[in-house]
Image (cartoon, helix red, strand yellow):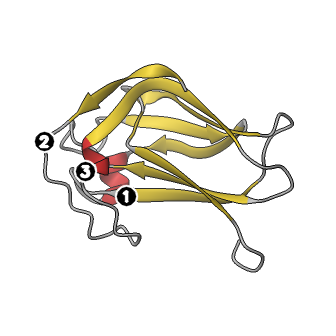
Amino acid sequence: MTGGQCAGSDDVIDTSGVLRGSSSTLYRSERFGECTYTIPVASGKAYAVALDFAETFYKARGQRVFNVSINGQAFLTNFDIVAAAGAPDKAIVETARGVRPDANGNIVIHLFNGPVDQPKICGIQIHVVRLGFD
């Protein structure tokens, strides 16, 4: 991981819309600012890359709008956490399926500035995709 800064919040996070039942504790910590995660994975497999978000700083739509790419391909463009989740302090997961490692055997997730403020993320989950489920 390179770039960005860590922060935390005491906000109560609504995780009712997150199917995996993640703890609200996950969503109270974050990395904000432009950053890149390089995650080594086994080659020859496809992965689901789940990105966990909850907006704890801003309380309205349009106050943080940013971009995310995975292995150099646009994944989330002009992403607004509050708009996508429907409210501040509400957890949301955005999942890219069928992601294959790059030529170096990595999944590279890059969060970068969009039209308003800077990106943030609360967590990353990577799962092997089983045949018939991607």
Give the camera-side residue of 21 and 72: 21
Up the image or down, 108 lies above or below 92; here it is above
Q: Secondary structure at mark 2?
A: loop
Packing grade of label 1 (10 A; few <14, some 14-19, many >=20) is many
Q: Which mark is residue 10?
A: 2
Quarter of the picture containing the N terminus is top right
Amino acid under disc 2: Asp
The percent position of residue 84, horizontal first and vertical second, equals: 38, 56
Of badges 1 and 2, nearer the viewer stands 2
Q: CA distance from mark 1 to mark 2?
A: 18 Å
Amino acid under disc 1: Ile
The percent position of residue 34, horizontal first and vertical second, equals: 48, 23
Of badges 1 and 3, nearer the viewer stands 3
Mark 1 and mark 2 lie on one chain; the one further toward the N terminus is 2
**Side (left or right) of 89 relative to 47:** left
For the point 75% across and 80% down, which residue is it? 132
Tell how many labels.
3
Q: Which residue is mark 3?
A: 25
The percent position of residue 60, horizontal first and vertical second, equals: 21, 44
Give the camera-side residue of 69 and 39: 39
For the point 71% across and 71% down, which residue is it? 134
Q: Secondary structure at mark 1?
A: strand
Q: Which residue is mark 1?
A: 92
Packing grade of label 2 (10 A; few <14, some 14-19, many >=20) is few
Q: CA distance from mark 1 to mark 3?
A: 14 Å
Q: Which mark is residue 121?
A: none
